[in-house]
Amino acid sequence: MDPFEISSAEIRMDELHVALTHSGNCRPHVFRLCWNGGFFESDPVIAYVTVSHDAQSDRCGDSISSEFRFGLSPMKRQFQRNYAAEAGTINVLGNGIAGFYTFTE
């Protein structure tokens, strides 16, 4: 995983919006939201996530600010399967990420 810094993270509807900075600008970079598919029992349940960064061997030093949107629907579907409930709240936590994902269906 290559270095980056999250400046803000917010859950909006079924998406996690992450603003971040990284260095580069010579090659496309790949950012992914990683989650193991499990929940830690709590009230509400907790899903630990991390954003991964692959700079594709980009050695340029420009400072780049970007915003990424990651879909949370797979997390919602897993919650619905695990808990037999259409509605719920998940506490999403990770590297610079903290927010409640609440859905009704």
Image (cartoon, rainbow, N blue to C red):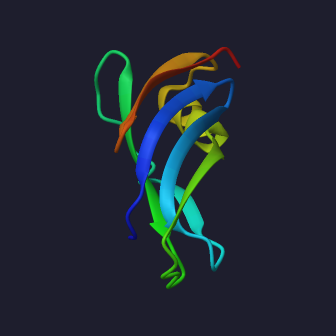
- Between 70 and 74, the one lying in front of the other is 70
The part of the image, by quadrant, that contains residue 67 is top right
38 relative position to 61: left or right = left
Q: Give the quarter of the figure containing the N terminus.
A: bottom left
Residue 10, image x and y in percent?
Answer: 54, 27
Quarter occupied by residue 18: top right
Q: Position of residue 105 (x, y in %)?
A: 71, 19
Q: Is residue 4 left or right of residue 31?
A: left
**Residue at coordinates 48% horizontally, 59% vertically from top-left?**
22
**Which of the 4 quarters of the picture holds residue 41?**
top left
Does 87 appear above or below 12? above
Name the residue: 67% across, 30% down: 14
Measuring 30% from the left and 34% from the top, which residue is drawn there?
40
Residue 62 vertical placement versus 72 (above, below) = below
Q: Residue at x 42, y 57 (%)?
A: 4
Is 64 situated above or below 93? below
